[in-house]
Image (spheres, rainbow, N blue to C red):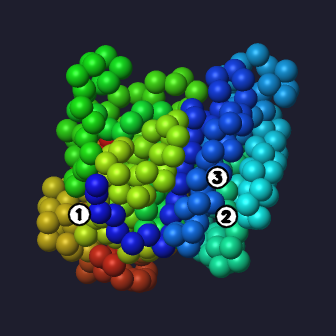
Amino acid sequence: MRTLPQINTLVVKVGSNILTQKDKGVNLEFLSSFVSQICEIRNSVKNIVIVSSGAVGAGFKILGFDSRPTNIIDKQACAAVGQARLIWYYDKEFEKYNVIPAQILITKDDFANRRRYLNARYTIRRLLEMGVVPIINENDSVVIEELKYIENFSDNDNLSALVGGLIGADMLLIMSDVDGLYDSDPTANPDAKRIGEVKYINEELFSLAGSSVSGVGTGGMKSKLTAASKALDAGCCVGIINGRKPGAMLDFLSGKDIGTYFSHNEDALSRRQHWIAYAAGVTGILKLDKGAVNALVHKKKSLLPGGVISVEGDFEMGDVVSVCDEDGKEIARGKVRYNSFDLNLIKGKKTSDIFDILGYKFTDEVIHRDDLVVINIIGE
């Protein structure tokens, strides 16, 4: 038995690899069992949010496809039809327990925009106060390839980690198609051993992570580790379990030694820092010299213009940019205090020269320490 922390708010991520059957649509037997467990967990956990994939998997058969389409337009059409069917299935199952579900469709841009990010938080909080179970999915029917510096969620593993940070969840429970993280690939090595608990996520762990074996979902084990790292940075402990096994959620939350448990990160970021590091849209790139990198990473200083080598992108004051070393490796993200045009003029210059060059001086700092988060996104 393992000891878990007190859980008041739980995010459960369920993927298409277990929610749908390959070329057959939604697995209604699994969905019924899943909702039954959620409703039982509600007896001990006050707030539960579901991050659910499966829209494309629920829609392609309805539209006459023999298998999941591969081109983006057909996938979006399937998602539009499938999301309606999927939430209908959820509603019918929750109705058996007199529980009201809510549908929230979201895109990366909703997280990147600070105002919409906060509005999403307030909406979800209010739903939870009213006893509703929010069901969140990426709005696949409208998502397109984003602008150069703004990434998609890539999969719902990462979306679930951002949701955990958004609402201040105590735990993120990721339902996978394997029993957890192993010390080697269990599909190739019959002697592979499950790793029961992880305290630190490092490159060695990522080297152990294989791919999803289902061929249905988009998120393999590496994606789940990346999501776990982001969730831990939000102060949210994480569990990865085999969702196909009956009662797996109940067993894990009761303390049984199943799956892989990632314990709480004592150096968690504040919610604002987590937004800057992982949720905000990155609109540009700053490359720094070695001295500036050392000042930011080891001395915890603000970024001054003298350390900036190059400026890439078109951004305004207050936007979030990626901060990289000379080789282009990202070391931090932060909110800039000068726009890209002005920053190109003062890069490499002394702070005493800013007024003479620009005709004004807002601050000495390009990025103040309070607006900067040093990050190490392992596995990306």
The residue at which mark 1 appears reads as: 307
- Give the mark nearest the N terminus, 2 or 1: 2
Q: Disc 1 and disc 3: Cα gap in Å?
A: 56 Å
Q: Quadrant of residue 294?
A: bottom left
Q: Is residue 312 visible?
A: no
The residue at which mark 2 appears reads as: 133
Tag 3: amino acid: Ser
* Label 3: how many Cα within 10 Å (few below 14, some 14–19, many 20+): some
Q: Position of residue 274 (x, y in %)?
A: 41, 67
Rendered-image quadrant of the N terminus: bottom left
Q: Residue at x 22, y 53 (%)?
A: 200
- Give the mark nearest the N terminus, 1 or 3: 3
Rendered-image quadrant of the C terminus: top left
Residue that extends furthest to the right in the rendered view of this protein: 63
**Vertically, is 256 above or below 354?**
above
Asked whether disc 3 touches disc 2, contact meaning CB atoms under 8 Å apart, the reply is no
**Vertically, is 179 above or below 362?**
above
Q: Residue at x 69, y 21 (%)?
A: 23
Q: Position of residue 140 (x, y in %)?
A: 69, 43
Q: Position of residue 74 (x, y in %)?
A: 77, 28
Kindly state the secondary structure of the residue where label 2 is placed.
strand
Q: Is residue 195 visible?
A: yes
Using the image as rendered, state which of residue 199 and residue 249 is in the foreground. Answer: 249
Viewed as shown, does residue 252 lie left or right of 376?
Answer: right
**Vertically, is 326 above or below 50?**
above
Q: Residue at x 57, y 32 (%)?
A: 17
Asked whether disc 2 touches disc 1, contact meaning CB atoms under 8 Å apart, the reply is no
